[in-house]
Image (cartoon, grey):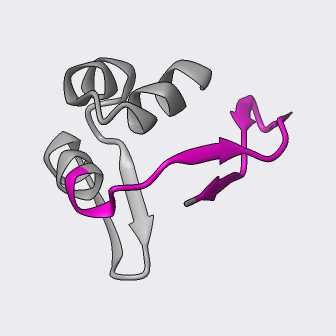
Amino acid sequence: MESWQAAVNAADEERLIALSAEDVEVVGPRGAGRGHGLLIEWLDRAGLAVTPLRWFCGAGRPRCPDRAT
């Protein structure tokens, strides 16, 4: 997760794609969708930095709520 967050913060599209599942889900105020193409559109449009707030695991998947600025 830390590598994914670092890729977002650096706007590193190649690294973000490499770290994300092909059917990655993007959820935001405009709705939800899936796929690398949408992820890159989101990254380009959002122009944000993410800061992890805390870490926890459940249902076999790690979770990390972020603060986006």
Q: Is residue 13 magenta?
A: no
Q: Residue at x 26, y 48 (%)?
A: 39
**Residue 31 location in percent, x, y?**
36, 78
Q: Residue at x 52, y 33 (%)?
A: 5
Task: Pick out the residue farthest to the bottom.
Answer: 30
Residue 8 found in image quarter: top left
> Residue 69's quadrant in the figure?
bottom right
> Does the magenta run of residues contain 45?
yes
- Horizontal arrangement in the rendering, residue 17 relative to residue 26 (left or right): left
Q: Position of residue 35 (x, y in %)?
A: 22, 46
- The extreme left residue here reads 37
Which residue is pictured at 38% across the width and 21% down the height?
A: 19
Q: Picture coordinates of residue 6 (x, y %)?
A: 49, 26
The one of 67 and 35 positioned closer to us in this rendering: 67
Residue extent of the magenta highlight: 44-68
Residue 43 vertical position relative to residue 6 in the rendered view, above or below: below
- Please determine whether, in this image, residue 37 is positioned above or below residue 61: below
Nearer to us in this view, 58 or 38 = 38
Question: Residue 40: percent from the left, percent from the top?
Answer: 20, 45
Q: Is residue 36 left or right of residue 21?
A: left
| Residue at 17 percent of width and 55 percent of height | 41
**5 horizontally vs 61: left or right:** left
What is the count of numbered marks?
0
The foreground one among 58 and 53 is: 53
